[in-house]
Image (spheres, rainbow, N blue to C red):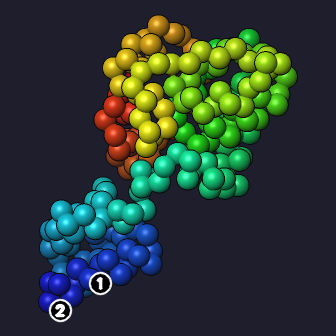
Amino acid sequence: MFLDERLEKILEILKNEKKVKVTDLAEKFNVSEVIIRKNLKRLEQEGKLKRTHGGAILLKELAHSSTLEERIINRTKPKEIIARKIIENIQSGETVFFDITSINYIAAEYLANSQKEITLITNMPSITTHFNKNSKISIIMIGGEYNKEIGGNVGIEAINYIKKYNVDKAFIGSAGIDLEAGKVMNFEANDGNTKKK
């Protein structure tokens, strides 16, 4: 099989299975893992996939390819379950931080309809729309540079605001988790640094 043929087949497999493993591809194409890694590197350089530990995923499958609004609209059952679990784990009297994530947006909606009395700190302005003047939730809005794609305030100014507060619980979003490497991933540096703080 020619190189270009193999690259096309790898992309075809990715489109169908959403992810591939180096070991599986090496076996399927009867070539070494070194060759497959080189193939994946080339496809990544062409912007067609993202290499992961031991494999690859389609670039268009990455969470960063959708805006916050799109992720909020895609209100899946697992997101609803996680949002409810978040609310179950918040007690009246606590100070809680909600990071920029569609699940926290949904959780804020549930929180607004609860009887809990907490202080909510957030860098996600759209969360505040859930709370009316009768709400028992006190809100502290983190300032900073507003990133339209991410849907919140990030960067050095946001970090400086966050440093001022201690919270009982923080709910932080991520673009992905690599269980093998033990890493939480993010796509944008300012957002990543803000989450880290």
Up-down relation of residue 169 to residue 129 (above or below)? above
Q: Give the residue drawn at x 45%, y 74%.
A: 17
Question: Residue 63: percent from the left, percent from the top?
Answer: 45, 53
Badge 2 vs badge 1, beta-carbon distance below 8 Å: yes
Residues packed near mark 1 inside 10 Å, few (<14), some (14 to 19) or many (20 plus): some
Up-down relation of residue 137 to residue 195 (above or below)? above
Up-down relation of residue 30 to residue 104 (above or below)? below
Q: Can residue 134 be seen in this view?
A: yes
Residue 49 found in image quarter? bottom left
Image position of 20 (left or right of 85): left
Dot label at residue 21: none
Q: Give the residue drawn at x 41%, y 50%.
A: 64
How many callouts does the rendering have?
2
Q: What is the secondary structure assignment of the residue under circle 1?
A: helix
Q: Give the residue drawn at x 82%, y 31%.
A: 113
* Residue where numbered disc 1 is placed: 9
* Residue where numbered disc 2 is placed: 1
Q: Is residue 57 visible?
A: no
Question: Residue 152: percent from the left, percent from the top?
Answer: 48, 32
Image position of 42 (left or right of 86): left
Residue 157 found in image quarter? top left
The amino acid type, in three-letter code, at marker 2 is Met
Residue 18 found in image quarter? bottom left
Point out the image quarter for the N terminus: bottom left
Image position of 196 (left or right of 23): right
The amino acid type, in three-letter code, at marker 1 is Lys
